[in-house]
Image (cartoon, rainbow, N blue to C red):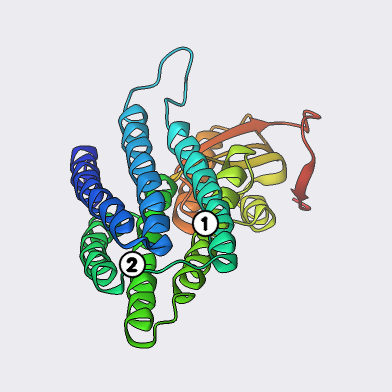
Amino acid sequence: MKENTAGIEGRFILALVLTGMILIVEIAGGLLTDSLALLSDAAHIFLDMLALGMSYGALRLAARPADERHTYGYHRFQVLAALVNGATLLIVAVGIFREAWLRLREPSPVLAGPMLVVAVIGLFINLAVALILRKHDHDDLNVRSAFLHVLGDTLSSVGVIGAGLIILFTGQILADPIVSVLIGVIILVGSGRVLRESLHILIEGTPEGLSVRKIADAICQAPGVSEVHDLHIWTVSPGFVTLSVHVVLDDPFTSETPRMQQGIRQMLAERFNLHHTTIQVECDNCGQGAQTCANGH
């Protein structure tokens, strides 16, 4: 059973508080130690807070009921929040690459001991935040985008710890900007995934894992169906997939028509996990949309 909205919102508030604590510690630690890796991580954490705040706001808006101007409600705010989160990940990655390049050209000393202490504190708090959000990251693109921000921070903390150990034991201060580049790559990969998925939803692409051809063939094989056309499948928001289709029946005037429609709906729910479906029954092709399949009833 899914956790209720209030429970998810509570997790976001707790995650925001913990992330704020990390931000303060890492900014202070970065300025104290002159560590670019720590300051890069702090910049990412600041965007994490924005991401968590936007995700929390999107959850609140998505919970509002549908109205005359927004008949599907406000679910798309979750996708928009994910898109903005992905864009901020991209921006921070570019910024980290720029600063790392400057630091590689002109290295500066780093206080490895304090840097390690701050990074370890950040790692443990990041792990706690990641565990808080992990429960929902597969079901909701909005939550997943926030989770990827936090996961990037967790990996960044591991990288900063590695850089601190290298500097402490070898004195190689170039480890700091090199780790920053690795952090930037991790962030860049996460941003690409989120941007791709959110844009796919916003342009109403077919949801991942669903085949229009297979679904059309399955409807076409239902008793009494002679043709399927104008089939559309899209995602309103993560977990809210919609299908509409025109179905030509051999005899649309039979008393069995409602039962046939219900049978198709049940099949779509059981085989393809599609629960929000609109099936328009016709006696002949209405001329709207391309024919998807036909058989020889």
Which label lies toward us, 2 or 1?
A: 1
Evaluate if marks 2 and 1 touch, with contact meaning CB atoms under 8 Å apart: no
Marks 2 and 1, how far apart at CA: 15 Å
Residue 209 can be seen, yes or no: no
Which sits in the foreground, 205 or 150?
A: 150
Looking at the image, residue 286 sits to the left or right of residue 72; the answer is right
Q: Quadrant of residue 169?
A: bottom left
Question: Which residue is the extreme one toward the bottom?
Answer: 170
Disc sitting over residue 157 in the figure: 2
Provide residue 137's location: percent of width, then percent of height.
Answer: 36, 56
Q: Residue at x 33, y 35 (%)?
A: 59
Residue 8 can be seen, yes or no: yes
Indicate the amino acid at tag 2.
Ser
Q: Is residue 263 above or below residue 38?
A: above
Residue at disc 1, secondary structure: helix
Which sits in the foreground, 153 or 239?
A: 153
Which sits in the foreground, 253 or 261?
A: 261
Residue at disc 2, secondary structure: helix
Q: Which residue is mark 1?
A: 96
Provide residue 216's location: percent of width, then percent of height.
Answer: 67, 51
